[in-house]
Every structure is written in structure tokens, then in C-alpha cells.
Amino acid sequence: QTFTAWCNSHLRKAGTQIENIDEDFRDGLKLMLLLEVISGERLPKPERGKMRVHKINNVNKALDFIASKGVKLVSIGAEEIVDGNAKMTLGMIWTIILRFAIQDISVEGKGGRMTRAGGLGSALRSRSVSCRVPRAETSAKEGLLLWCQRKTAPYKNVNVQNFHISWKDGLAFNALIHRHRPELIEYDKLRKDDPVTNLNNAFEVAEKYLDIPKMLDAEDIVNTARPDEKAIMTYVSSFYHAFSGAQKAETAANRICKVLAVNQENEHLMEDYEKLASDLLEWIKRTIPWLEDRSPQKTIQEMQQKLEDFRDYRRVHKPPKVQEKCQLEINFNTLQTKLRLSNRPAFMPSEGRMVSDINNGWQHLEQAEKGYEEWLLNEIRRLERLDHLAEKFRQKASIHEAWTEGKEAMLKQKDYETATLSDIKALIRKHEAFESDLAAHQDRVEQIAAIAQELKYGRTDGGTDSRIPLRGGRGGFWGGVSWQNPARGSPPSAAAAASAAQCPYCSARPFPLLCWKTALEAAARPRRRALTRIPSPQGLIAAHDQFKSTLPDADKEREAILGIQREAQRIADFNSIKLSGNNPYTSVTPQIINSKWERVQQLVPKRDHALLDEQSKQQSNEHLRRQFAGQANVVGPWIQTKME
């Protein structure tokens, strides 16, 4: 009964209990759980099977654990426990009680400290179990007995000399409780001749206020000539551990009072560190995105304001944070030194607030700061250059606009339709002079276009610079003049047509393959209107022949580009890479290139036929003009004579 109650006092901490001590330990599960609770250690994982071999294995694990604590078990095997041998089971439980409840009892006395930390001594030797352990200065039994004698010495009618007769009247139990908790027991009202009342009083108070379960029966003790020694020792050891825990708690409280001031100071340092670290890291977190922001401004004034803000950050905002960082490191080192002197664990800041985290964040801040300053200076230099180019563009464009004033309207005039022959000759001479002047302005227009192009690509956002004036209101001052000129003057020569072979979209000469094919596709289309106003197709035929001579080189370039695409596809297939549908660097696909190339191949022969037809038509017209001239030269003088 006592051993069952003792086991349940520990098993209830794990939410379970036993009913029959020789049956409930047979599978080894609750036995292993009991050892884990009283030792505070983890045993090997038990086997959950219901077969005998599983039960034996579990009990063996428990016995091995007991043996590992320095207790040599003799004549106790797992088979006896599994078979429900009550004698062996009780002997094993008694061994556990001795090892974990009685063996480590210590007593302070006049002669110094007497501690039982070694073997279990003669108390382990009983008929139910044979346990051999080395005998130390004082046995566990004698240590517990000495503790009881010291605690009950001041009480009358109490003389503890053993663990059987000395406890029959119940006064010793009450004396132990009164010694440690005098408010629970009215010791002076107890009578030696009423042992049952004394025993029940002690048992009830212990269970109600000390959390010591009732392990003994008062009538059994009184009616037995010699109470069971093991049962008394087991129950008394529970008192020792209950009061020993209270004494340890009181000692710990005294120690806490002694070091409270130091601990409070350390706590303040910890709180100050956490707060300063949090504030500093938050400031770094807010500042780094500002320093990493590379959004360009459109004017120098805005960029200079950014530079001024950065200088304010350097002069005003950053120095206090540098001091905070240094003070934070000083506080951290001071705190660690105090904790080490107080034999306390080192201070571990919250996650993300270590000194290393602060140093890493500060290093990131320094890197962002350095890059930000370099970017600001580069942006200011870029905007200054763009401002200079914009002013240069405005000046040159204004000069050229002044020159083109009225030129396009003059070229569109049809004054030649009503002019006489002499007026026509004067207009021709005037137009030739204009063509010479127009050629002289060609370089100036190219310079203006180059400046505009540089302004366009000088913008970091890829848009058109707002400082480029919109000069298209006059019909595109150079485009209108240069394209109206051939309609009024002589047709362009083959050399002029070849020199004009530049991309109308990107101004490149020679222009890229796609733009080149787009332009050739347009040039290869028959233009009836253009041919009808050119008196001789020889220049167009020569230009077309020169154009056809470039086709082989263009085809090589096309094949090279397609080869790059095929190589990219081969590498992707080899490495099992799935290429995305769109090329992020261009919208041109091999299909577009091949489509345009096939279109050019179709248009070239058509233009050949159109030019040959036009040449035949012009030759026929030339024959008719000569025939007309021969007859007109005969009748003309006659008409002139008659007119006079």
C-alpha cells in the first residue's frame, strides 16, 4: 500500500497512476514513466506491442537505467517483473525509493556536513531483494534517521531511535510538521495515549497542506507490534523532500535579495540595450532605402537639392547615430562583464539585435551612402551636359529655322506654269542657287539631328527630352525642304540616291538589317507617280542595280542572325531550358526577318520590270518628241514670220 501510494505521488505528475503494483508494472511502460518522472531524464523509447518479448524489453530498459545509477541488482530479472512476481516487484520499487528518495539525504551538524551520496548500505539488504552497494561513512538509513532526530529533538515525548516503534504514537510525525510549519499543528494539544488521532492528524495535514499523499494506515501502525520499517522510511523521506524543497526555496530567496540590486541594474542595461538597438536598427532600415533610391530628377536644381539633403544627413543626422552606436557597444561590453562577475549567463539580445546585426546593418548603410554620393555627382554632371546640349540645340535650330522661313512655300509654288521661256530660265538659275545653298546647310542639319539624338539618349527614362523644341509645325523644316526640292528641280542622280541610303527611323548609316529591309521594301515597290515626273529612268535603274548588288551581303547578315537564333535554341535544348515566348531585348523575330526578306525577293523583279517598261515608254516618248521637233522646226519659223 505504501509503495503504491509513493509511486502514484510521482506518476500523477505525468497524468496517470497504478492500482495494483505487481500487475501494472508488468508491461514496463509505467515503470519507465516512473523512472523518467523521478529522475528527470529521458529513457529509451518503449515498445508498444503486447507480446511478451516487448514487455521484457521495456522492463530491461528500466532495469538497465537503475543499474546505470550505480545500483547493482541481484536476482531481479525482467521475467520476474513481467510474470507479476510481487516479491521481486516490491524489492525493485524499494531499490528505486532508496536510490532516488533516501540516498542523497544530507544533514548539517556541529561536526560539519554529513552527506549520503554513495551506496545504499544495509538498508538495501532485505529478504525481498539483494542489492550490493559500497558502504560509505553513514548509510542512507542512518542519514535519514539523523535528520529526524535533529528536527524532533526539542519536542517532549518524542525520541526517534528507529523507523518502527518510535513512530507508533504519531507524535514524531506531528513534530516534523510542527518544526517546519508550526501554524499547521497545535502540538501542545496532542496526547501520547491517543496514537490513532495523532497519526490521522499528521496524515491529513500532510496530504492537505504539504501535498504528501497518505501512504500509511493509522490502525495498521497502532495494531502492529513492529510497524514495517520500509513503509515508515518511505513516508518519512517524503517529509524530508517536502521540507528540503521549502528550505532550498528560502535559501534561494535570500540569495535573490542579496543580488537583487545587481540584477536590477543588469536588467536596466539589457532594456536600454534593446531599446537603443531597436531605435538604431529602425533608423538604419529607414535610411538605407533613401540612400539606395536612384530616381533621377529632370532639373539640376532638383538634383542639387538632393545633394544638399545628403550633406545635411552627413552633418546633422548621422553623427548622433555614430555616437549611439559607440555607446551601444560600450553598454553591451559593460553588461557582459558584470554578468560574468556575477556568474550569470551572458546576455543574448533578441533575434536581429545582436552587435553583429548592428555592424552588418551599419556596413550596408556605409556602402549605400558611398554609392549615393557618387550617383548624385554623376547625375549633376549629366544634367549639366544635357543643359549645355539643349542650349546648343536651341541656338542652331533657331538659326536654321530662320533660314528655312518661306523656303517650303517657295518650293511648292507653281509659278513656272504661267512663266515665259526667259522666266523659266531665270527660275532654273534661281533654283540652282538654292540647291547650292541647301547642300551647304546639310552639315548643319546633321549636327542638329546629332544633338537631338544625344539629348534623347541622355535621358535615363528613355523618353524624349522636354528641352528639344517641337519643330514639326513647319512641316518638318528639313524634311519638307529636302523632299520638295527634287520635285521642283532636276531628278537626283544615282550617287545622290546611294548617299541617301540611311534609315529614316534611327538615322543610322549604314542602318541595321531590319530597318534596311524595311526601307528597301518601300524602295522596291513601283511608284508610278515618281516615274512619271522623272524624264529619264537611267538614274533609277543605276540606283536599283546598286541596290541589288547589296543583296548578297544582306543575305549573309540575315543568315548570321538566324544562325545566332539557332545556336541559342540548340544550347537551350541541350541544357533542357525552356525559352520564353518573347525576347526581352527586341520585338524582332526570325519569322519577321524571313517574311520581310521574302517580300523583298518578290518586289525586286517587279521593280526590274517596271523600270524596263518605263525606260521603253520614255524611249518611245523621246522618239515622238524628236519627230515633233523636226516638224515644228520647219513650221515654227514660218509662223514667226507671219506673226511679225
Image (cartoon, rainbow, N blue to C red):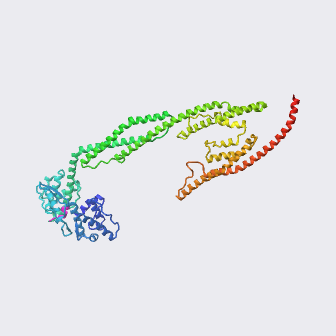
Count of numbered marks:
0
Magenta region: 226-234
Residue 324 vs residue 300, the one in the foreground = 300
Quadrant (top left, top right, bottom left, bottom right) of the N terminus: bottom left
Pinpoint residue 431: horizontal percent, then vertical percent. 71, 33
Say which quarter of the image contains residue 479: top right
Residue drawn at 24 percent across, 66 percent down: 67
Indicate whether residue 228 is drawn in magenta.
Answer: yes
x and y percentages locating residue 98 in the rendered image: 21, 63
Q: Is residue 396 visible?
A: yes
Residue 88: x and y, percent? 24, 69
Quick check: 103 above or below 439? below
Q: Identify which residue, 423 or 61, lies in the foreground.
A: 423
* 498 left or right of 262 in image: right
Q: Main secondary structure of the magenta part?
A: helix
**Does the magenta-highlighted stretch encompass residue 24?**
no
Which residue is nearer to you in this view: 145 or 447? Answer: 447
Q: Is residue 512 left or right of residue 250?
A: right
- Residue 62 x %, y %: 28, 65
Quadrant location of the C terminus?
top right
